Amino acid sequence: MELIAGVPLLFLTLTLIATSQASQVEKPLPIHPLRSAYGSGHDHHLHGISCASWRLGVEAYNLRDWKTVPSSCEAYVGHYMLGHLYRQDSKVVVDAAALYAQGLNLTKDGKDVWVFDIDETSLSNLPYFAKHGFGVEPYNATLSKQWVDTGKGPALPESLRLYKKLLSLGFKIVFLTGRQEVQRKITVTNLKEAGYHTWEKLILRSPEDTGTAIAYKSSKRKELEAHGYRILGNIGDQWSDILGSNVGQRTFKLPDPMYYIS
């Protein structure tokens, strides 16, 4: 069993899964036991700049094209992701999205859709990143694929709550991901086991889909609209999920200080 500072990694996964299956959790998660391995929450500094300010720059899209989390910020990012602030920040985004959705008058023709990204939006890869420095280590395509292929990504609780709310309002759900087409079967299994039981479309990247994430997702959204779908909402953890063309009527960005995709 993998250990992080003496704590089983499996405990992190089980905690996330249990939380994702809880119904309408209103209180933020208690601070995760693993957080002690990453400091007491005191800010760290990068060349005289606080890591909290670095994260703000990331979320405000002022810092772009960065490759890894600064090594001096590993403890800070780990504390943020494993503590309650990540959940609270996600709740603010989802609450705003749900309020917006409730105010819409849907056409009831089955063409009103909400686009969800998958990784760090619908499903969490935190068990993987906890083993790899919370983004401090350079991206490793082989190891990342091996993790995805386990099909054990737990649902992000706030995103699952939004998903259920949107279904109750009559939205159709479209999952649009940068995962490869060859990962469709395991992705379907993982989504369903995590609580996402139904959707209109699951769009994965084929070998013919070249270019940046922004270009790829823009083209897929354009295709959706060409088939008569109306994208009323669009949520993702990366700016590349919500930038480009055909982004939808409203976009919502979830926090993610662990990696950047252009």
Image (spheres, grey):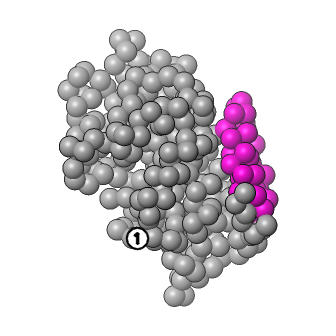
Q: Where is residue 256 in the image (x, y as percent from the top left)?
A: 51, 57
Q: How crowded is mark 1: few (under 14 residues within 10 Å), some or many (20 or more)?
A: some
Q: Can you tell which quarter of the image residue 26 is in?
A: top right
Q: Is residue 251 left or right of residue 53?
A: left
What is the quadrant of the C terminus in the image?
bottom left
Return the residue nearer the eye: 34 or 76: 34
Image point 36% across, 67% down: which residue?
A: 64
Query: In the displayed structure, does residue 251 sit left or right of residue 244?
Result: right
Q: Nearer the viewer, residue 140 or 61?
A: 140
User: Where 165 sits versus 122, above or below?
Assistant: above
| Residue 32 spot, x, y in % from top left | 76, 56
Task: Please provide the residue range marked out in magenta.
Answer: 7-35
- Judge whether residue 258 can be spotted in this image: yes
Magenta segment includes 22: yes
Image quarter in which the N terminus is found: bottom right
Q: From the image, tell me which residue sits under label 1.
A: 67
The percent coordinates of residue 183 (x first, y second) are 41, 40
Q: Nearer the viewer, residue 134 or 221?
A: 134
Q: Quadrant of residue 60?
A: bottom left
Residue at left 39%, top 45%?
Answer: 179
In magenta stretch: residue 190:
no
